[in-house]
Amino acid sequence: MLFRKTSRHPLGSLYLTAVAFIAVVPTFLSHHPLARMVDPNDRQSWNISANGSIPGQNAPIRTVQHSGQCIALTFDDGPHPIYTPQLLYILRKHRVRATFFLTGVQCEKHPSIVKRIAAEGHELGNHGYLHARLDKMSPESVAADIRRADQVIVRITGIWPHYFRPAGGVLTPTVLQAATQTGHPIAMWSVDPRDWVVGRDATAITAVVKDAVGPGRIVLFHDGGGNQPRMLEALDSLLDFLKKQGYQFVTLSEE
């Protein structure tokens, strides 16, 4: 049965951890955030360090800790006015709840879809406001981008998004510091079918997930960006397959 899960704002109990080092970025980069907006389909040019972390600095989660065969589905870059409603229909049909990492700018464009995501029992995550090149920004600018997305999501739904996922999976000391300062643990993934690649068919997407899935895995999908029709095609059949294999589906914060 679907239910709505809320998160409490943690800043009242948050203490700031000491940081090992801070990335120094030219000052002028922090003055023009719009100039750093990135096409989600251009990920191959990104400086991605999706497997890295710095000891003591907000170590990202890559799995969920549950007994039994539980996995978490996550969807990035939405909400999309066409594909997110289709995705919600598929999830509802299969009685599956997921975690949506939303961008602030898309939430402002499509607030009714954001409300629907929350109302149908899915968890809301912060994917930044602009889906920007965080590795090209100052610590202050990254934190401001995260906070702006928080404000938008809270204003629309009344729910504070617990987890943050950096755009493109970029993990740098600056990103880790900003996430800590804004009170967000970072959620990455352990299965990436590269569903966003335009031209990648549903068979290829399905094959990667079937091969890599396992208990506790976090699966990365995208309801925004590109190639969503193939992702939706793959997902519908994947959910049937995974349920027959005995998997249960949880959100990232579900206990």
Image: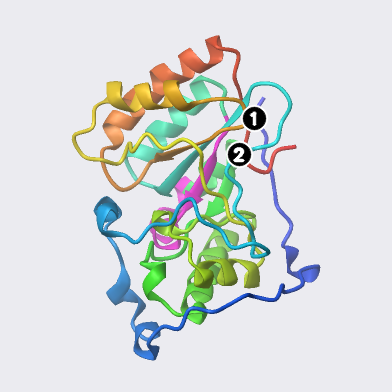
Picture quadrant of residue 95: top right
What amino acid type should be assigned to the residue bearing mark 2?
A: Thr
Residue at 29% in and 25% down: 204
Vertical comparison of 251 with 95: above or below: below
- Residue 154 in the image: x percent, y percent? 60, 61
Farthest-out residue, right: 13
Most foreground residue, 68 or 109 = 68
Q: Quadrant of the N terminus?
A: top right
Farthest-out residue, bottom: 27
Most foreground residue, 78 or 17 = 17
Of the residues under marks 2 and 1, which one precedes in the sequence? 1
- Residue 255 in the image: x percent, y percent? 75, 37
Most foreground residue, 117 or 219 = 219
Helix, strand or loop at mark 2: loop
What amino acid type should be assigned to the residue bearing mark 1?
A: Leu
Q: Is residue 102 left or right of residue 20?
A: left
Picture quadrant of residue 90: top left
Residue at 70% in and 36% down: 65
Circle 1 is placed at which residue position?
2
Magenta residue span: 97-113
Residue at 46% in and 35% down: 191
Farthest-out residue, left: 199
Q: Is residue 93 left or right of residue 216?
A: left
Q: Is residue 103 magenta?
A: yes
How packed is label 2: few (under 14 Cα within 10 Å), some, or many (20 or more)?
many
Circle 2 is placed at which residue position?
63
Q: Is residue 86 visible?
A: yes
- Residue 82 in the image: x percent, y percent? 32, 40
Marks 2/1: CA–CA distance: 23 Å
